[in-house]
Amino acid sequence: MGVLCLGTPLTWEETKNHADHVRNHGIIQFIHTWHRVKDRTGDELLWGDEVECMVVVVDDEKKEAKVSLRQAETLEELGKIVGTLSNDTSPSTPVAEFHPEYGRFMLESTPGSPYTGSIAGLLSMETNMHYRRTLARNHLRKNEILLTLTSFPRLGTVDVFTEPHYDPKDAKSSRSLFLPGEITHPHTRFSTLTANIRNRRGSKVVANLPIFRDERTPQPFVDPTIPWQRDIYPEDSEAKNGAALIDHIYMDAMGFGGGCCCLQLTFQCCSVNGARRMYDALIPVGPLMLALTAASPIWRGYLADVDCRWNVIVGFVDDRTREERGLEPLKNSRYIIPKSRYDNVSLYISSEWANKPAYNDTVVPYDEAIKDRLLSHGIDEMLSKHIAHLFIRDPLIIFSETIHQDDSSSVDHFESIHSTNWQSLRLKPPPPGSSMGWRVEFRTMEVQMTDFENAAFAVFIVLLSRAILAFKLNFYVPISKVDENMQRAQKRDATRTQNFFFRKNVVPQGYATPAAGLAPSGSSTPSECGDCGMATQMKERKLRNCFPTLARPPTTDDGSVEDEYEEMSIKEIFCGKGPTFPGLLGLVDAYLGTLELTPVERKKIDKYLDLVRGRADGTLQTPATWIRSFVRSHPAYKFDSVVSQEINYDLLIAIDRIERGTLCAPELLPEGYSQPYLNGFH
Ligand code: ADP
Ligand code: MG
Ligand code: MG
Ligand code: MG
Ligand code: MG
Ligand code: MG
């Protein structure tokens, strides 16, 4: 969530009237940005993670667990202490940052400054994550625990699930049947966002997740805990009038999605073209990482038949009107929009030849006037279309104090639209007045229960992104297939049961050497940026960040791409298939072979990669699978899909103990990894 500025947020009725103003000035701001940074090159690899977590109050006697709504207090105390703790190597930079999040029980933490591209930088992340966790923990009360858990299993049950308790009947912004307004961060930004999404849409937001059918789950399942007859707000009747589906877990408020915790990574790229190619390459990786990190099988106290948060958030920021959703003919709305504001991206955006038109094979509405305007400023077709597509959305929050801005120095209006497109990838332009370059954010992963796992997935993605540059990898498949993969990724036990569309040949011709499998493109390859070539990086033992130009192969290509991809298992995609497809781990391994790593460094990296491999080949469970089987083997579980207060308490305590290294979970973490800080792994 962006910076919280002070101000008076406008209601939806008022916001609507300023939408064109915000779009117009947002585009002017982007054009200013473009002219400022379009030629910027040579930026080194800097990168950072965002880890979201939740604070839970436990009552060991009653065996109860509730989310703790003390975010503001905790953040204030952390804010005081963070300023006083500085980095060993660079005393002026803080070691950690803490940010508020949508849920009043959540915290987000990031490193105080980005990691560099050095091997040491890569290997310092887990320590930093653990430091942040410990720092936050030190500011909790005795009965509070801090969990990096994707969703709180009993959020929105009929029981008490917040501390202190509030009644949902006062949820004026969301009108939820289940969540009180107090679940939301108290800054008006968040309640306004909630109300404006609902008002723009014209009804409450909704998500229905299929219930997990256990031996004694009633069939059909009609949820007895929904207050079907409540009659406080006009929206109360929506549930009984069709919004709540039979055999599903019905949820009706942004808090269910905004209350989810995830793991995000941001990389600085050497140039805008490098960033666009990285963005494209990571698009097909998004759903695969969602499947591997799946961690949220319980919703509103029920086991679901899905393992991930993704579709929940898709539903909960879906501000599209009925017309935009294609349910009514267009009259007041301008476009039929196939996707929510939160979803897989809709366009590959590189302007290179490798990005064939056939890959962008879905309907992508865009604002033609905006696109023309961007074109007229010399911005190319693909990037113009990308921005014009994001700008079909209305702004969701406008503060009366900041309607009029200096467009040459502010990007607030641009970000007002840009950063409320919550998609699988985000291209972040360099902000004014900062040293940051073009960055790409990878946003699909669910947060893992331990720092070790979070670090492992982050390290894997960083290394994969470097392999993409080193070997000029090509991962393009049609975007419709990535959309389909995104749905498959969320299915129960997806890593073991689903196949995913993936490209058969990812190494361009001329780069596959039979012996080593792969050869890096090397410093002799023409590169867009002068000073971040491979040679320097090798000398300084830095991870690669330079962007080699892709030579167009001689081709009789007819533009069709159907033969380029096939369905593969997660195991094949990660561990390889046949002599020509090394798998993503094989690619990472080949990249590591080009670095001069010490045995200690290599061993440490291999431990991370072992976790990824274990998840991919099925020898290790995803957190979702582990959580589901914990519930199903709990003595109090009645095989009716219900996750009771007691089961939930035991589950969260177990997760906390796994993280602390006092409980082994060999199905989840390889033997010996379960006590990383106790037995000297790190
Ligand atoms: P947002 O919530 O807008 O996605 P945050 O500020 O919460 O962004 O997190 C951004 C992440 O990017 C942090 O981990 C931060 O350390 C990292 N970061 C900061 N500067 C750079 C940079 N120049 N290049 C890459 N990453 C950066
Ligand atoms: Mg966040
Ligand atoms: Mg953030
Ligand atoms: Mg931010
Ligand atoms: Mg982010
Ligand atoms: Mg740990």
Image (tube, helix red, strand yellow):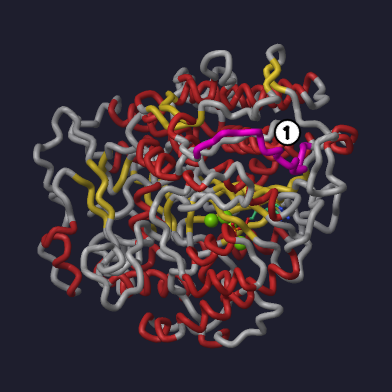
From the top left corner, tell me how far across and down residue 402 is, in percent: 57, 84
From the top left corner, tell me how far across and down residue 224 is, in percent: 13, 50
Instruction: Give the residue displayed 14% in from the left and 58% down from the top.
Output: 242
Would residue 317 appear left or right of 22 to someone viewing this image? left
Residue 62 visible to an observer of this rendering: yes
* Residue at which label 1 appears: 470
In this picture, which residue range is highlighted in magenta? 543-558
Q: Quadrant of residue 366?
A: bottom left
Instruction: Give the residue displayed 54% in from the left and 19% down from the top.
Output: 576
Nearest the eye: 117 or 651: 117
Q: Quadrant of residue 281?
A: top right
The outermost residue toward the front is 556
Q: Identify which amino acid the numbered label 1 is placed on.
A: Ala
Q: Is residue 550 in the magenta section?
A: yes
Q: Is residue 297 in the magenta section?
A: no
Instruction: Give the residue displayed 66% in from the left and 34% down from the top.
Output: 553
Q: Main secondary structure of the magenta part?
A: loop
Nearest the eye: 489 or 671: 489
- Mark 1 lies on a secondary structure that is helix
Would residue 134 appear left or right of 87 to someone viewing this image? left
- Ligand 4 is found in the corner quadrant, namely bottom right
